[in-house]
Image: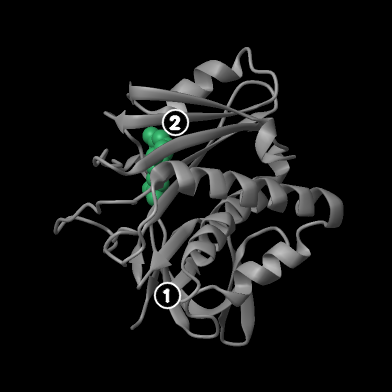
Amino acid sequence: MNFEDWKILRFEKLSSTNDTALEYSATADGCYVIRADEQTAGRGRRGRVWQGLKGNLFFSLLLKFEMEKLGELVIISALSLYQSIKQISPQADVLLKWPNDVLLSGAKVSGILLEKAAGDYMIVGIGVNVEQSPQGKDMLYRATSLKEAGINISGDDFLTLYLRIFSNNINILNAEGFESLRRLWNDNAKAMGREIVVRQEKKDVSGIFKGIDEKANLLLEKNGRTDKITFGDVFYKE
Ligand code: BTN
């Protein structure tokens, strides 16, 4: 898969690029990028709202991908964001947070929402705070933007770089499997070997963060036992 394989469709305004990607998936042939300059009903994980702040990047990748490898796709999507930021600004303080967050100077700079589409298609919806970050007391995590961290890049250039890196990672996955990508993710994850809390719907679970396994589950060690966590929001004990 190469950058040239992506059909990039850019819209001025959409409710959600994930919704438009879903519509396209019914008749899709190949892989697409659905991008909107403005998003009026952007969605985040678990029904949360994703604000459509001006100057930020909103796009959805529409590609064929095996459902069983969903976890890998999440990790690759986030890792590619990490690598893109590091390529633009090698000294930037960027770390990964399970399952799909990228932290810049300790704050959330992007969001990823995976959804199933028609046939074998998957949607990877990505929001990157290029110029602005949402603020407010009701936010689950502190947010930042590339600009606030002193990284000046246009949305166009960021997207091009991201698509190149993402395509390359998919090629690595297909040729060699997940292991080297998993290792790269683990090497750059925040709080490896430290205590974290995973907030789930009905309970909080805490333990020592041991990275992700070969299926992209989070590994949490407690009382000499390692549990596999498949969902939840991670919080750090600073
Ligand atoms: C999260 O961190 O909660 C995920 C946020 C995902 C936001 C992006 S913006 C482009 C795409 N369209 C949406 O409605 N959501 C995703």
For this rendering, which residue is in front, 197 or 224? 197
Secondary structure under badge 2? strand
Tell which circle, 1 or 2, labels the residue nearer the N-terminal end. Answer: 2
Residue 36 occupies quadrant: top left
Q: Residue at x 39, y 63 (%)?
A: 203
Q: Is mark 1 within 8 Å of ligand 1?
A: no
* Residue type pointed to by label 2: Arg
Q: Which mark is residue 180?
A: none
Q: Residue at x 28, y 42 (%)?
A: 55
Of all residues shown, which one is farthest toward the left? 137
Please give left or right for residue 81 compared with residue 148 in the image. right
Q: Which mark is residue 93?
A: 1
10 Å crowding of disc 2: few (<14), some (14-19), many (20+):
many
Q: Is residue 21 above or below residue 143?
A: above
Regarding residue 139, the answer to whether it shows in the image is: yes
Q: In the rendered image, which residue does mark 2 sit on?
A: 35
How far is mark 1 from mark 2, CA to CA? 27 Å
Secondary structure under badge 1? loop
